[in-house]
C-alpha cells in the first residue's frame, strides 16, 4: 500500500543526505562574511582561528594609582631607615593604566608612601609632592601590568568554529579586532502545506488545525544560528506545492516542506520532490517520524536540499533535531559538542519496535541521590509533550524495550538545576496541583505532577520514585482515607501525611443534564454511556466501592471499559459526545461547561517521603499551604473545602 | 586615603540596592506588553500563567488514514469470519486529521481492511470502495485522537515567569493564543568613561586602551533579556559624566557607569552619583571588583538606579553577574533556577583575604572519573581569563583559602559536555600546542594546555590531574629526554611517551641584536638584562644546566630573578624593553619581531597517562599527529623538526 514509503535506517538516511550534499559541494561552510565587532556578534560562529593582532596591555602599564620608581634606588629602605626620592627625576605619579615612564620599572601604591613638601614635611597634596619617602625596598616590575601579560601578540585566542559569547567580545577587541569573519547564516524556507490548516489567531472549527509547526521549526532554526522564512499556508494541491518549492529555491539553502510526506491520498511531497529534483529518501525507521522525505531540488545549476517533515508536531520537531541541527552545524562550521546528558532510572517499562530508532521524551526529577525518568505520552501528535519534556531517551534499533528501574542515558532538554529544583508528585490528578505549581514556581520550585492514580502514586513513593504522592483512597471498613493503603503499600519508607483539601466527587454530565442522570443507578440505563478512570485511580476505587455496596453490576455499564487518566480527560470525553457522564471532581465540570451532580466528599492528601519532608527542596511547600492568598484561591474553586489544608494527619 | 571608598559585605550591598528599589516600587516586573506569537517570541518571559483557551485536538480526530467505523458493528469479526461494511452508512474514508463523522467511534487503518467493489471483489480503488471487509473486531475509539487528548481546555500550559523556548511556541498556539503578554524588556544604558579609552578599531598607542568593556556589558545585558544602549566614550570630566548620566535617565531603567568608580584622582563616579541623586554603596568586599558604586539617580519624580562598574574587565564582568543579572530577573519576573554546578578537585592551593567574597575563575577537565579545576590568573585586568574560564568558584567571606586537592563547588560557564570532551595537557609551553588545539577542535576535542613547566606537568600527571604532560627535560648524564624524570616523579601510573617534535632553543634578542648577544657568557655583561622562565620549566633547567657546565654564576646575571611563564611572555618582556634577552624557542621570536640566536636542540614529548592513552577522548590525537597537513603546518614553523612526530619513545 505504501506508495513510495520504504523505511530505511536513520544512519543510512543521514548518509544519503551527506553524500548528496558532498556531491554538489554543499557539505561544508556555506560562506563567510565580515561583520563589525559589536554586541550583535553574539552567537555568530568564527570562520577562522583568531590570533592576537596586538598585545594587551600593549605597553607596560601601572596596575595602581601611585608613584613609578626605579627599584635599584629603593634598595636598603627599611622602616627605621627610609629613603627619600625626588619627584620627576626619581619618582613620577601615575594613575592606574598609565604607561610606566621610560627608565622606571615599578610602581609603589599611593597608600604606601609618605608624600613630602619641599621642607621634608608631610605634604597636603598627596599626589603632587616634592619628595616621597619609602620604608621598604621595591622589587622590579611590582604593580606593573607588563606588555602582553594578558594577551600576547600572535597568541591563539579562539579556534575557528567557536561560537561567540558575550565575554568573548572583550578579548577579541583587546586582541585588536574591530571586524571578524564569521560563517554566513544558512537561510531556511519553511513551507507549511495542508488544506486543513488555519493560521494562528483563528478559532479552529472541527476538521481545522491551527498551523503552528512552522513556528516551532522557525524557532529552532533561528536558535541554531540559521535564518528562517515562513511561507504562507499552501493547500494540498500538487501544482501549488511545486510552484512554492521552485520559488523558494532561489532564496534559501534548505527547504522544509511540512506535512504531506506520508503516502496518503493528499500527500504530494514525494511527487513534488521527484518532479523538482531527486528523491533520495522516503521513510526513515525512526519513531516518532517515519514518513521523512529527503531530496535535492534542481533549478538550472542551482541545488537545494529539501526535507519533507512529517505533520505530527512531535515527529516534525524530532526530524529537525536529527537531520537539520547537524546540517546547520556543518554549514556554520560550528564546533560540535554533544548535548548535556545524565543517567537516570527509568520509572516504568517501555516497549519499542526492534526495527526503529525510537526517541522517547521523558520528564526528570532528582529523588534522593538519583535522577528519575518518567516517559511522557508517546503520540506523535502530542504537542504538549514537546514543551513538557525534560529530556530525550533513545531506544536504538535492535532493542525491543527497556524495563522499569533500568539505568538509561538521557539527553537534557532543560537546565540540570531546573531538574534538581523539581518536586516530583506522582499519584492522583487534581486541579489543585496546578495551583500549587503556580505558587511554588514563585519560590523557584518546579512542581511536576505525574498522573498514575492514587495507588500507583503510593507504590512509586515506596520505591523512592517520587518525593510526594497525591492520594485519596477510601478505606471502606473505617471510612478513613489513605492510611490503610499506606500501611499496605508503603513499607520501605516513612511518610508524613498532609491534608490538601476535602473535595466533592460526583457525576459530570452534559449542560442542563439532558439525560437526567442523578445517581449511580442511572449508569445501568441503555441510553447512558459512561466514561471511566483508569484502574488504581482513587476515583475508580470510589466508583467500584459504591457500585458494590449498591449492588450495581459493572459489566452492565456501557463504557465502563473506556478509561481516561485525568478528570479533564473525562470532562473532554463528555463534552465531545464520546460519553454522557463520568465520575469526577466538580472543578473539571467548569472547563467544558458541563454540569456536576455531587455524590460524595473525600479527603485528598499529600503523602511525603519523610526523608525529604524537611529538605530544602520541599520546604517551600509548607509556606504555600499556609499562604492566605493560596487558601483563598482554592476556596474560591468549585467543590473544595480547605479547613484541613496543611494539617499533619495521623492514622488510627 | 580612600576618599569615600568603604567596603561593605556583598550581602549588605545587594540588600541596600533591593531596599532602595522597593522604596520607589521598582523591585518588581517593570511592565507588561502584548506581543504577537511568532518566532521572535523566543526568549521572552511570560507575564502570567497560560491556561489553554481551546482544546487540542478540538474535535475527535482520525489518527490514521483509514475508515471510520461503528465498533458495535465489528463485534465477532474473525480471520475466518470476516464482516463486510457498506461505505457511507457503515464506514467512511478519513484522512489523518479528519473529524470522526457523527455516529462513528473508531478508525481502521487502511492497510488492515480489504476494499471491495460492488461485486465483493477486491477493489482497485482502495480508498473509494463500495464495501470494506474486516477480519477482526475494533475497540471503541481506536486510532482516534480524542478531543482534549493533547491539551485540555483550561489546563495549565505554563506558569508565569516561564522563558519561551522554540518548542513552547507550538503548544501556546495549539492552546489558542495568537498573542501573549510578556514582561517588557528592561532598558540599560552603558556609559564608558575614561580619557585613556579609544574606540574599537583604533591601534592603541602607549597609554591608550581599547574600550571593550561596554561591549561585554551590552552582550550580557542582551543575553539576559534586556536591551542595552552603548553611549560613546566620555572623557574623565565631572561635568561631561554628570550630563550624560542625566541624559540617560530619561530613556533607561538602569545606568551602568563604567570605570571611575574607585577613589583615584580622576574617579568622578561617586561624586556624580552624589550630585545626581543618592550614593548608597561605595565599595563592596568582593574580589575582583572592590570599587563598586550603587546609587539612585533622581530627575523630577523619576528614579533610576545606577551602578558604578569598576574598570578592570574581570571586575566589570563579575559586577554585572552579581548585581545586574538578578535585577533583570526580578524586572522580567523570570523564574530563577540556580546555575549549573559541579564538584571538582582543586588543582592547587589558593589563598584568599578573609574579609572578601572571592570569585575565582577556573578551567575544568574530567580526568578519569573526576572533574579537575585549575585556577586561572586572578588579575582583575586579565580579560583573557574571562573567555578562558570554564567555571567560577567562590571562596566566601571568612574563608582564607583552599588547599590543593580539596573538593570545590563550581558554577559552570560552559557546557558540561564541552568540559567532558576536553583533553587536559599540563606542563611545558610550546606554540605547537596551539596548532594541536586547532586540529583537534575539528575532531570535537577541546585541547586545553595549562603551563606549569615540564616538571610541574609530570607531577600533575602522576597525581592524575591531567591526561597528558608536555615535557622536554634533559637528563644531563645521558643526554636523553624525560625518562629519568618520569622514573623519578611519575610513580603511581604507567605512561606512554610520544615525541611531538625536535625544537631549537636559543636566545631571543631585540631586532638586529643591538647588544650583540651571542652566547650564555654574554649574560654576565653589565649592559645585558636577562628575563628568565619560572622554576621547573624545561627551559629553565636547560639554562641552569648550561650555566653550570660553563661555570657561569647565575647570581651575576641581571634579571635572573625575573620570571615569565611562557615563551611569548619572555618575548613580550624583551619587546617592551624590560629585558634584552631570554632563552626560548625560535617561534616566539617571530611574534614580536625579535631575533633568535640558536644554541641548543631538544626533544619535546607528550607524556600520556596509559590509562587514558587508548580512550575515545584521546584517540583523535594520534590521527592529528599522522595528519600530513598538520605535519606540513608544523614543519613550516620556525625552529622545528618533525621527523620523530608521533613516534612512541622508550627510555634506556
Image (tube, coloured by chain):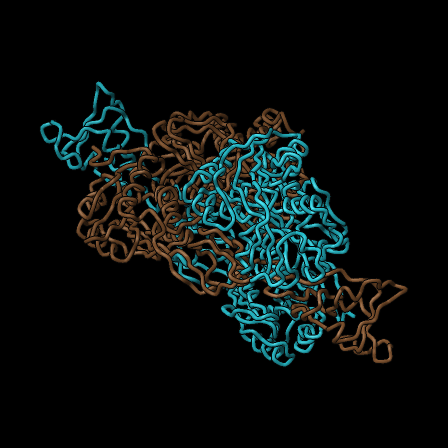
Chain colours: A brown, B cyan
On the rendered structure, is A562 left or right of B351?
Answer: left
Whether A63 is drawn above or below A16: the answer is: below
On the rendered structure, is A340 left or right of A301?
Answer: right
Can the viewer see residue B470 in this picture? Answer: yes
- Quarter residue B71 falls in: top left
Q: Position of residue A7 (x, y in %)?
A: 28, 33
Query: Which sits in the foreground, A32 or B174?
Result: A32
| Residue occupying the point 49% across, 47% down | B435
- Quarter residue B22 falls in: bottom right
Whether B427 is drawn above or below A456: the answer is: below
On the rendered structure, is B287 left or right of B66?
Answer: right
Q: Position of residue B122 (x, y in %)?
A: 13, 28
Quadrant (top left, top right, bottom left, bottom right) of the C terminus of chain B: top right
Q: Position of residue B263 (x, y in %)?
A: 72, 70
Q: Position of residue B590 (x, y in %)?
A: 52, 57
Query: Which sits in the foreground, A177 or B92?
Result: A177
Residue farthest to the right?
A80
Whether A553 is drawn above or below B567: the answer is: above
Query: Which sits in the foreground, A562 or A68?
Result: A68
Quadrant (top left, top right, bottom left, bottom right) of the N terminus of chain B: bottom right
Amino acid at each position: 500500500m505504501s506508495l513510495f514509503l520504504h523505511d530505511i535506517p536513520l544512519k543510512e538516511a543521514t548518509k544519503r543526505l551527506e553524500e548528496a550534499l558532498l556531491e554538489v559541494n554543499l557539505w561544508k561552510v556555506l560562506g563567510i562574511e565580515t561583520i563589525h565587532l559589536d554586541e550583535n556578534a553574539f552567537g555568530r560562529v568564527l570562520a577562522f582561528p583568531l590570533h592576537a593582532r596586538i598585545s594587551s596591555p600593549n605597553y607596560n602599564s601601572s596596575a595602581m594609582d601611585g608613584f613609578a620608581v626605579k627599584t635599584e634606588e629603593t634598595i636598603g629602605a627599611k622602616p627605621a631607615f627610609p629613603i627619600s626620592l625626588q619627584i620627576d627625576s626619581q619618582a613620577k605619579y601615575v594613575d592606574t593604566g598609565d604607561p610606566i615612564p621610560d627608565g622606571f620599572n615599578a610602581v609603589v601604591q599611593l597608600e604606601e608612601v609618605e608624600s613630602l613638601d619641599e621642607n621634608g614635611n608631610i605634604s597636603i597634596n598627596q599626589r603632587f609632592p616634592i619628595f616621597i619617602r619609602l620604608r621598604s625596598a621595591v622589587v622590579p616590575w611590582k604593580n606593573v601590568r607588563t606588555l602582553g601579560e594578558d594577551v600576547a601578540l600572535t597568541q591563539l585566542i579562539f579556534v575557528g568554529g567557536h561560537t561567540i559569547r558575550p565575554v568573548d567580545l572583550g578579548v577579541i577587541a583587546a586582541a585588536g579586532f574591530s571586524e571578524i569573519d564569521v560563517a554566513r547564516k544558512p537561510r531556511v524556507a519553511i513551507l507549511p502545506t495542508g488544506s486543513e490548516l488555519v493560521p494562528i489567531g483563528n478559532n479552529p472549527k472541527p476538521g481545522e488545525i491551527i498551523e503552528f509547526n512552522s513556528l516551532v521549526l522557525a524557532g529552532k532554526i533561528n536558535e541554531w544560528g540559521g535564518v528562517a522564512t515562513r511561507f504562507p499556508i499552501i493547500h494540498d494541491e500538487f501544482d501549488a506545492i511545486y510552484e512554492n518549492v521552485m520559488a523558494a529555491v532561489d532564496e534559501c539553502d534548505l527547504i522544509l516542506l511540512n506535512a504531506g510526506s506520508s503516502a496518503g491520498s493528499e500527500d504530494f511531497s514525494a511527487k513534488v520532490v521527484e518532479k523538482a529534483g531527486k528523491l533520495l529518501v522516503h521513510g526513515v525507521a525512526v519513531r516518532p517520524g517515519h514518513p521523512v522525505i529527503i531530496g535535492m531540488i534542481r533549478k538550472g545549476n542551482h541545488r537545494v536540499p529539501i526535507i519533507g517533515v512529517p505533520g505530527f508536531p512531535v515527529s516534525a520537531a524530532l526530524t529537525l533535531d536529527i537531520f537539520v541541527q547537524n546540517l546547520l552545524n556543518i554549514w556554520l562550521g560550528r564546533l560540535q559538542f554533544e548535548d548535556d546528558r545524565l543517567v537516570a532510572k527509568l520509572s516504568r517499562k517501555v516497549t519499542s519496535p526492534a526495527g526503529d530508532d525510537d526517541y522517547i521524551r521523558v520528564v526528570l526529577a532528582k529523588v534522593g541521590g538519583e535522577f528519575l525518568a518518567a516517559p511522557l505520552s508517546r503520540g506523535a501528535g502530542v504537542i504538549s509533550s514537546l514543551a513538557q519534556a525534560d529530556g530525550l531517551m533513545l531506544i536504538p534499533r535492535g532493542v525491543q524495550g527497556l524495563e522499569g528501574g533500568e539505568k538509561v542515558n538521557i539527553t537534557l532538554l532543560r537546565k540540570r538545576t531546573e531538574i534538581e529544583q523539581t518536586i516530583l508528585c506522582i499519584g492522583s490528578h487534581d486541579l489543585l496541583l496546578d495551583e500549587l505549581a503556580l505558587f511554588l514556581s514563585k519560590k523557584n520550585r518546579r512542581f511536576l505532577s505525574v498522573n498514575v492514580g492514587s495507588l500507583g502514586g503510593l507504590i512509586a513513593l515506596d520505591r523512592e520514585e517520587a518525593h510526594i504522592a497525591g492520594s485519596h483512597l477510601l478505606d471502606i471498613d473505617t471510612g478513613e482515607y489513605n492510611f490503610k493503603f499506606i500501611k499496605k503499600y508503603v513499607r520501605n519508607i516513612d511518610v508524613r501525611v498532609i491534608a490538601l483539601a476535602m473535595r466533592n466527587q460526583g457525576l459530570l454530565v452534559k449542560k442542563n443534564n439532558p439525560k437526567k442522570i442523578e445517581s449511580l443507578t442511572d449508569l445501568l440505563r441503555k441510553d447512558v454511556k459512561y466514561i471511566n478512570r483508569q484502574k488504581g485511580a482513587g476515583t475508580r476505587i470510589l466508583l467500584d466501592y459504591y457500585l458494590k455496596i449498591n449492588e450495581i453490576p459493572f459489566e452492565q455499564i456501557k463504557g465502563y471499559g473506556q478509561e481516561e487518566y485525568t478528570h479533564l480527560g473525562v470532562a473532554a470525553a463528555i463534552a465531545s459526545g464520546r460519553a454522557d457522564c463520568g465520575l469526577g471532581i466538580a472543578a473539571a465540570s467548569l472547563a467544558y461547561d458541563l454540569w456536576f451532580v455531587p455524590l460524595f466528599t473525600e479527603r485528598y492528601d499529600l503523602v511525603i517521603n519523610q526523608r525529604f519532608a524537611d529538605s530544602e527542596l520541599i520546604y517551600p511547600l509548607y509556606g504555600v499551604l499556609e499562604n492566605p492568598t493560596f487558601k483563598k484561591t482554592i476556596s474560591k474553586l468549585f467543590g473544595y473545602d480547605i479547613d484541613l489544608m496543611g494539617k499533619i494527619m495521623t492514622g488510627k
